[in-house]
């Protein structure tokens, strides 16, 4: 998760945490049924995890950055299952989770091919009928400035439904926010 210092500060700020809780997650997850066993991919510093941990009975997270994974373990102890691993090759059982979620992290996956492997892994670990949902940013000048020096491979929202179908999902859909700065997505494992 190579990120420049400004981006690290921003993602670990109280302002970002408040925006996640008050705006981002309510919008991204509007109408999504979690079930009882949820996996979050790429929580980073944990702003989204803090909200999800209060909303779902059983939460697991998978984080590629060791320092972030260790920080989440210190913060949550045994309350959530923290796995330090790459989400493109998850060391997790197949068909285990009711929902797989990820927020503002797909653009940090280093290539479209790796993103597609992540989608295939999300499909593999979901139970039949499970939902894959989340959100990411739409590229813009401001977005590119925040990500100077970062690993940053934006996902065009219009291409995502086909990519999710290719991974095996049904009923993939995306929608762009009113501001045009973000998109949300959801799809179901048949």
Image: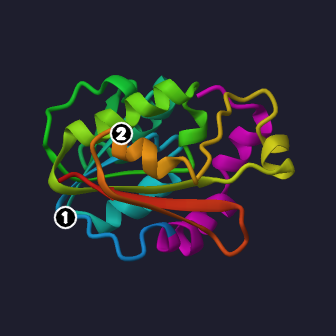
Left or right of residue 166: residue 45: right
Image vertical order of residue 113 relative to residue 30, above or below: above
Q: Which of 111 and 34 lies nearest the eye of the viewer?
A: 111
Q: Is residue 18 magenta?
A: yes
Left or right of residue 104: residue 46: left
The residue drawn where x is 14% and y is 35% is 94
Disc number for residue 35: 1
Sequence-first disc among 2 and 1: 1
Start and end of the magenta stretch?
Answer: 1-27
Circle 2 — which element? helix
Disc number for residue 180: none
Split into 4 quadrants, where in the image is the N terminus? top right
The residue drawn where x is 38% and y is 26% is 88
> How many residues crowd around disc 1 within 10 Å: few (fewer than 14), some, or many (20 or more)?
some
Image vertical order of residue 70 relative to residue 139, above or below: above
Image vertical order of residue 87 relative to residue 57, above or below: above
Q: Which of 20 and 181 lies nearest the eye of the viewer?
A: 181
Residue at image mark 2: 166
Left or right of residue 127: residue 166: right
Q: Nearer the viewer, mark 2 or mark 1?
A: 2
Task: Give the main secondary structure of the magenta stretch.
Answer: helix
Left or right of residue 122: residue 113: right
Q: Is residue 158 magenta?
A: no
The residue drawn where x is 78% and y is 48% is 143
Please tell me in which quadrant of the rendered image residue 92 appears.
top left
> How many residues crowd around disc 2 within 10 Å: few (fewer than 14), some, or many (20 or more)?
few
Give residue 62's position: percent from left, percent from top. 36, 36
Circle 1 — which element? loop
Give residue 163's position: percent from left, percent from top. 44, 42
């Amino acid at each position: 998760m190579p990120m420049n210092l400004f981006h690290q500060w921003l993602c670990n700020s109280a302002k970002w945490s408040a925006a996640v809780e008050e705006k981002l997650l309510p919008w991204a997850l509007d109408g999504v049924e979690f079930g009882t066993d949820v996996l979050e991919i790429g929580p980073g510093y944990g702003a989204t995890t803090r909200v999800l941990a209060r909303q779902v009975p059983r939460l697991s997270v998978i984080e590629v950055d060791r320092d972030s994974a260790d920080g989440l373990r210190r913060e949550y102890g045994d309350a959530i299952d923290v796995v330090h691993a790459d989400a493109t090759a998850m060391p997790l059982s197949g068909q285990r989770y009711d929902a797989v979620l990820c927020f503002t992290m797909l653009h940090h996956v280093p290539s479209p091919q790796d993103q597609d492997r992540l989608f295939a892994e999300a499909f593999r670990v979901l139970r039949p009928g499970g939902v894959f949902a989340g959100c990411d940013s739409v590229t813009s000048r401001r977005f590119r400035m925040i990500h100077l020096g970062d690993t940053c491979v934006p996902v065009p929202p219009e291409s995502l439904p086909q990519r999710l179908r290719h991974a095996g999902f049904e009923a993939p859909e995306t929608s762009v926010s009113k501001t045009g700065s973000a998109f949300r997505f959801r799809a179901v494992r048949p």
